[in-house]
Amino acid sequence: MTIGDAAHGPDPEAKSTSKSFPWIREELILACELYFDHGCKRVDHNDPGVAALSTLLRSANYHTVDLSDHSFRSHFSVSRKTSDLHTAHPDYPAEKKRSNGGEPTARVVREFLADEAGMRAEAKRIRSSLTTTLHAAPLPANRTLLQIQNMRVHRAAGMPASLHKPIALLWALGRLARGEVPQVRWKQFRDEVGPLLEVFGHESSKVTLENPVWYLRTDKIWEVNGLTTPDDRAPSVSRLDAVNPMVGFTTEAAADLRRPDIRAAAVGYLLRRYFSHADQDALLARTRIAPDDATNVADTEVRIPGPRSTEGGVPPGRTSSTTTRFKRDPAFVRYLKGLYDDKCQICNSPMRSINGGSRSEGAHVRALKEGGPDSMDNLLVLCATHHVEFDGLAIHITDRGDVITTDTGEVEGHLTFMPGHSVNLDHLRYHRALCGRDEHPDVQRRPGQGQ
Ligand SMILES: [Zn+2]
């Protein structure tokens, strides 16, 4: 395994153009899938698969790019990437000249060779997330974000990718979200991240805290200060305990990740890539990326009986007793509200309640009682007015994010998205079908409608 190459981070692709958009891992996986589809041969720029991938990558939100730049992920560019993949293949003759694919390209080829079915499943997931959701406009290329997207994770044979680095990163991102310093003593890392690895790591994987804390350095976003090892192997836990070094984000990475948009993109990326089947709500809560909502008094107060005596009756001398319990949003709802700074995704107006607390609302696109999932991709952050209008079918949303007045068909506005948050198009279609403006297999045409 070579660590050094990763220092250069992403591929040095498109050197000839003034702007460089390094291929991120998702793009490389899709290109490698195409390369494997063609029996591990370079794919010509006239190939229909190349054209389809070019279209898909140009419409993805991985990079901020002026799409009048026709060279960006053009047919030629995609075809050239299959050449890079080909020369990175271990069977490629050593004496022949290799193109400049870089280590991330070579790594994806190795991963396909080691586990083609697993990588094809990964490609399918990437493809579906690109074609089935409404999401934020692309972010400007950001070095820290690219390093996270190209992060190396340990992958033992026959095992899923280790989650130790992603969990440690989420914990560190939670600290930045709360305005805390980006580096802490090792012992604090040990005591706080250790339990997270036990809960959210793979069941079969041993908790080895020294690995993520040490090898995150190779992704160039992390430091362990005041400790060196002779051969760059991870130091033992006892050595870390003895030295107790400062560990955490580099100054540069911390500066990038303090920006809410970059941080949101990083959190969204980590959740999508590593925790799609995990309990994301618990993960956001435990890493404390979702803010606590102690000050956010929910509008649903539930009055419940006060404490009873041990005999089970009402305590003597008190005819009635109530305590007030406030409904608490799930962690992912709190996370999204924080992401949008409690502003409505339609009108961008912040909602303030009488007591000054913020009152943005999490609106399910497809209602839970109608089979919608309680997940981020079925949720919009709206003000009370737009929440009522949306639930009342007075407005609906197109696949492009236009907000339409259902009665008149007029475009009322456009949905704002933050990086890392996306909404499933199928849920939007379901809602439009309720409005009588689309069809959905789960929505019966109502009597008298559309006759
Ligand atoms: Zn609004």
Image (spheres, rainbow, N blue to C red):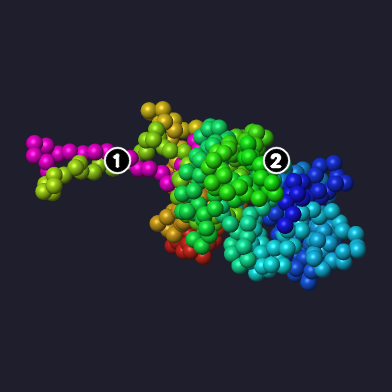
Viewport quadrant of the N terminus? bottom right
Find out if the beta carbon at label 2 lies less than 8 Å from the nearest ligand 1 atom.
no
Percent of width and height locating residue 86: 82, 63
* Residue drawn at point x = 66 percent, y = 45 percent: 229
Q: Residues within 10 Å of mark 2 (few under 14, many from 20)?
A: some
Front: mark 1 or 2: 2
Residue drawn at (44%, 59%) of the image:
371
* Visible residue check, residue 102: yes
> Which segment did they paint magenta?
314-342
- The image shows a total of numbered marks equal to 2
Residue 418's disc is: none
Q: Amino acid type of disc 2?
A: Asn
Q: Which residue is mark 1?
A: 325
Task: Indicate yes or no whether the magenta region holds residue 130.
Answer: no
The local crowd at label 1, few if under 14, some if 14 to 19, many if 20 or more residues have their Cα within 10 Å, is: few
- What amino acid type should be assigned to the residue bearing mark 1? Arg
Q: Which residue is mark 2?
A: 142
Q: In the displayed structure, would residue 119 be above or below residue 229?
A: below
Give the residue drawn at x 70%, y 65%: 112
Q: Position of residue 364 (x, y in %)?
A: 46, 50
Mark 2 element type: loop
Does residue 320 appear to the left or right of 166 in the view shown? Answer: left
Q: Closest to the observer: 323 or 28?
A: 28
